[in-house]
Image: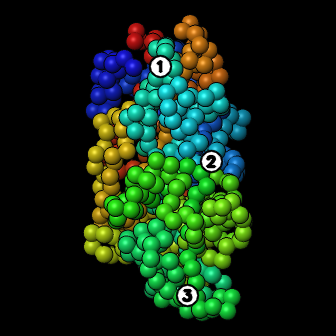
Amino acid sequence: MRLNVTKLSALSAAVAAAGSLGLLAGTAGAATFPASHDTQCENGDSIFGRGASFARGAHIGWGAEILTPDAFSRLGQGFGYNAAGCNNSTSPLVSFAIGRESVSYYPSGSGSATALFGFARANSRVASSFEINFGGTDEPGTSTQNGFAVDGDPAVSYDNTDLETIPLAGSAIAIDVKLPAGCSVDPADRILSPTQVEGVFANDAGFTRWGNIFTITGTSGGNACSSLTINRVARYDRSGTTFALKQFLHAVDGAEGWATTYSTDNRDWPNRSTNWYTSNQINGAGALLDSLSGTTVARDNAGSTSTIAGGIGYADLATSRGRAYGWYDSAAPDANDERFWVYVRRPSDNVEVSPAALDDATTTTDYGAACDDVRYSNIPATTEGDWTGLTGTPTNQDYPICTPTYALAWEEPADFNRGYNRSIASATGPFTIDQARSTKDYITYALSAHGQGLLAARDYSALSPDLLRVAQAGAAVLGWNNAEAGE
């Protein structure tokens, strides 16, 4: 791909100015639209996103309709309803507020988005990628993968369009437990060390039975609960949540192969032939927890299905609470509650921390993830950079397994259409300028003070100021056809 000095200069300027961005900047940074679309919400249209199930709850908060595999109706709030979004009486797009136009999101896993955006190999963008206007992922692309996406067909240059990887929100990965029927763990003992978490998911000797990790009482199926095997339940799909969890596991045990052997295809796990299951060929965190809970069957490594009798899994905090893994009363938890997330000890000080700011599952309090003060390092200068080296250090009362979730968006969809049409002369195509306008506006709304302020109620954390500055600058450069600026 060509090196564009003009674009790099514009990006650098956008990063520097990000702190002064308005709620929805119509022409900030390098973004270009013709006069018909150059202001907030002007002539926008319904848009569709696909990807990380980790982000599902955040998109609910921002007013999106959630589609299969974990559907949720649109709430009367967010992008199409608030004046900070596209419910503005002076805007041509008042119809967003009354439901004619909408944002829809498919929480089908990070891998479903990165595949459509062409991360796999050169010339791997696929026609179905035109069915979505933005992607969602918790596993950002490497420099090589981003290059594949940007270049499209390497035989031509007219389809090159920069890919922006834009942080949207942060949250915690809860370690969720479903005890076998008849078993009980005192709430004071629902705590795991990083070594125990890693050992259980690796199925290492000394971590395969419930008595290895908890003081557990009762019997199930005529056997002492302490002697029963722990079933591991993992995602069926290539999941960004799995990627982020394995980054944590790698930090605990760098020799296991979490970042190498079990990262190339992150659906692979150590010792898969025993005590290992996935959801039954259904993507997403909700499907994992349904199999863990026993409400749907699980599939083992050989492809056989069964209802498992308890186990351990993982999911974003919002999905965990939604599937009843929250604690029902922090003042007097029920020791017989068989579904719960565990506290995990922070490696730095050995303090046990919940993934949630509040554990209670039966009130309407704004919960939020215990990730507010994570200190991030190795932050790329722009959203066109490689985010795979980003590291987070928990501070204060932070939980040790926190991660951002990202949007994927094309800077110049017109060039993407040229690739679809196989013609340098044709910028029209399945991705319309109306959708480009709304994609920019929706992402910028999510990064506004209003959008970030909606996250705690959905079990997320707002972005840290250093991540937010880069993210807002990335949203500012989203446009339609930057060739109009003489590029």
Left/right of residue 197 with respect to residue 301 in the rendered view: left
Per the image, the residue denoted by label 3 is: 227
Which of labels 1 and 2 is toward the front?
Answer: 1
Front residue (pair 467, 153) = 153
CA distance separating discs 1 and 3 = 57 Å
Q: Residue at x 29, y 55 (%)?
A: 375
477 versus 177 height, above or below:
above
Q: Amino acid at mark 3?
A: Ser
* Mark 1 and mark 2: Cα distance apart in space: 29 Å
Nearest the viewer among 212 and 242 is: 212
In terms of sequence position, does the residue under pointer 1 or pointer 3 come before the other? 1
Residue type for callout 2: Ser
Where disc 3 sits, the SS reads helix
Residue 108: numbered disc: 2
Residue in front for this viewpoint, 355 or 330: 355
Residue ID for mark 1: 154
Q: Secondary structure at mark 1?
A: loop
Q: Residues within 10 Å of mark 3 (few under 14, many from 20)?
A: some
User: Residue 412, percent across and down?
Assistant: 49, 22
Query: How far across and how far down the image is residue 484, in percent?
Result: 46, 11
Whether residue 44 is situated above or below residue 320 in the rendered picture: above
Q: Quadrant of residue 229?
A: bottom right
Tell me the kind of residue under disc 1. Pro
